[in-house]
Image (cartoon, grey):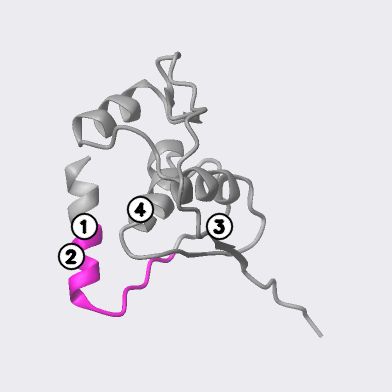
Amino acid sequence: SGKKNSPEKIDLSIEEEEDNCDDSTPYSWGGLSVGPVWKSRLLKGGFMRPTPIQSDAFAHITKAKQNVIIASTTGSGKTLAYLLPLLTTGGKKVKGMIWIVTPTLELAVQLRGVVQKL
């Protein structure tokens, strides 16, 4: 019998941001290697630095060999947390498919808005 991979769950309730992000290189946005084009787009889009969920999700998603579920409070930056690894790596570091399922049209529109902002 085949055993299915269980998703890796990232559940962060981090309230305080750590200010140890290295932005000294042209490709680094808050310590994340996003490339110079995406760094510029993020900054122009008003995203000055990643939230804790975005930083942690980036690391997990780009290294994951299984599904990842992101759970965090409203307003914590989850939308960009799961889009950023796909957008910045062009899908190269993301293995398999990425499915983004929203329970409402409102959330789908929000997701599209974040992508269009960038």
Mark 1–mark 4 distance (CA, rounded to whole Å) = 14 Å
In front here: 36 or 23? 23
Q: Quadrant of the N terminus?
A: bottom right
Q: What residue type is labelled 3?
A: Gly
Please state the extent of the stretch shown in magenta in the rendering. 99-111
Quarter occupied by residue 40 = top left
Which residue, given by chain and number where applicable, does mark 2 sit on?
109
Q: Give the amino acid at mark 1.
A: Arg
Query: Which comes before the other along the chain, label 4 or label 2?
Result: 4
The residue at 32%/73% (across/down) is 102
The tag earlier along the polypeptide, 1 or 3, is 3
Q: Earlier in the sequence, mark 3 or mark 4?
A: 4
x 50%, y 53%: residue: 14
For the residue labelled by badge 3, is the local secondary structure a helix, a strand or a loop?
Answer: loop
Q: How far apart are marks 1 and 3 (CA)?
A: 22 Å
Q: Which mark is residue 77?
A: 4
Q: Are marks 1 and 2 in contact (CB under 8 Å)?
A: yes
Residue under label 1, please give it.
112
Q: Which amino acid does label 4 sit on?
A: Gly
